[in-house]
């Protein structure tokens, strides 16, 4: 049996796991990224972590078929170079040559959101579907498209940026420079901004009290917590947030018609309080003719483990397709 190594490169931690061909995790390790260092040092640590994870799994490098690396930013899987990585000092980083040289294995790279989508497709909420999209609601909005069980990200591997499609013309300025982006309204960061605004506008609200009790700290949970206490301001805010989320997701569904659309990220810990009203709001926004099968919206299953599983499964798919690594 050929195993695969998945490496999840993050701004805070680097995680690696040995994954079997069915997507089961055999062993995993994690180290701090220490992102302020030169990229060469970080890449070398990724290679060492991969080797250590194989030993931790009581396997040898000869048992491994390939290595997959998921990273924020834009990769070039043809050359094995990470063109740049968000929040990391990576520019034209030679991922393949360094890690491949250390391990003697083929190395493939892709965006971390794409890898999360692959993981959900293989062993998560979209398991069994040939076509799916995974949307991650975090600091920004990440997205990964799976078509016929393979990642799709455009000719330059920079596609699937649904977070930077506009849902409010002339709206809030996004980090990308456009106004009214989906990310500005439906990410966890967007919800936190709107929660702070609501608390300021209604100092008698439960939202305001919860923020004071937490010494000014606001999270994506704050509005939902206040809503559960019966706060009218929070109820209106959550409803407005779900409207924004539904608008953006309807665009994704109408454009791609995936069999399953998966939503992940910390906001999704709200479970049915988010999912059930969201499904209702999508009705009428998504375009399905009479008798046409509808996209099913589900919550992600894999959480923080999606990165390493998806990177490994991406490497497996590239190997099977004969892509040079």
Image (cartoon, rainbow, N blue to C red):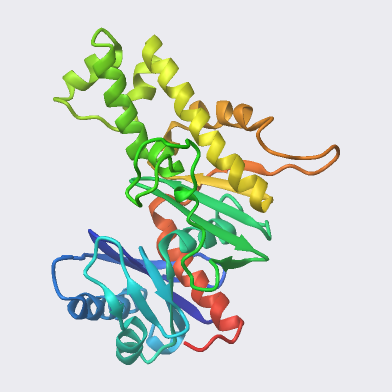
Q: How many marks?
A: 0
Nearer to me, 98 or 234: 234
Q: Quadrant of the N terminus?
A: bottom right
Nearer to me, 157 or 125: 157
21 to the left or right of 91: right
Task: Please say whether residue 60 is visible from this viewpoint.
Answer: yes
In the rendering, at what x and y percent does residue 64 appear? 45, 83
**Is 161 drawn above or below residue 203 in the view shown?**
below
**Is 224 drawn above or below residue 271 in the view shown?**
above
In the rendering, at what x and y percent does residue 172 appear? 36, 36
**Is 46 drawn above or below residue 304 in the view shown?**
below
Which residue ends up furthest to the right in the rendered image?
Answer: 291
Look at 47% across and 56% down and name the residue there.
161
Look at 27% across and 75% down and name the residue there.
91
Nearer to me, 134 or 229: 134
Look at 37% across and 85% down and name the residue there.
96
283 to the left or right of 213: right
**Is 320 drawn above or below residue 124 in the view shown?**
below
Task: Please say whether residue 258 is visible from this viewpoint.
Answer: no
Q: Quadrant of residue 237?
A: top left
Which residue ends up furthest to the front in the rendered image?
Answer: 170
In the rendering, at what x and y percent does residue 323 appear? 55, 85
In the rendering, at what x and y percent does residue 175 appear? 32, 49
């Amino acid at each position: 049996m050929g195993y695969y190594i998945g490496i999840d490169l993050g701004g805070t931690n680097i995680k690696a796991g040995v994954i079997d061909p069915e997507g089961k995790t055999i062993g995993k390790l994690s180290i701090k990224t220490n992102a302020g260092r030169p990229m060469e040092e970080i890449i070398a640590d990724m290679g060492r972590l991969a080797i250590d994870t194989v030993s931790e799994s009581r396997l040898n490098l000869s048992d491994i078929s390939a290595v997959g690396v998921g990273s924020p930013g834009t990769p070039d899987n043809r050359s094995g170079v990470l063109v740049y990585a968000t929040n990391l000092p990576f520019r034209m980083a030679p991922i393949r040559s360094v890690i491949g040289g250390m391990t003697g294995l083929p190395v493939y790279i892709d965006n971390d959101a794409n890898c999360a989508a692959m993981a959900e497709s293989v062993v998560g909420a979209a398991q069994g579907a040939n076509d799916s999209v995974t949307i991650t609601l975090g600091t920004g909005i990440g997205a990964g498209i799976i078509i016929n069980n393979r990642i799709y990200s455009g000719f330059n591997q920079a596609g699937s940026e649904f977070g930077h499609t506009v849902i409010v013309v002339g709206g809030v300025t996004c980090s990308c420079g456009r106004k009214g982006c989906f990310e500005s309204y439906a990410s966890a960061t967007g919800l936190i901004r709107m929660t702070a605004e609501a608390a300021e506008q209604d100092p008698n609200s439960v939202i305001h009290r919860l923020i004071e009790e937490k010494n000014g700290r606001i999270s994506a949970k704050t509005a939902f917590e206040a809503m559960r206490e019966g706060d009218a301001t929070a109820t209106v805010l959550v409803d407005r947030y779900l409207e924004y989320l539904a608008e953006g997701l309807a665009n994704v569904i109408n454009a791609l018609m995936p069999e399953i659309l998966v939503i992940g990220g910390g906001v999704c810990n709200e479970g049915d309080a988010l999912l059930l009203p969201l499904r209702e709001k999508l009705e009428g926004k998504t375009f399905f003719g009479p008798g046409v099968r509808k996209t099913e919206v589900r919550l992600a299953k894999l959480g923080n483990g999606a990165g390493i599983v998806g990177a490994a499964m991406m490497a497996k798919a590239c190997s099977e397709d004969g892509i040079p690594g």
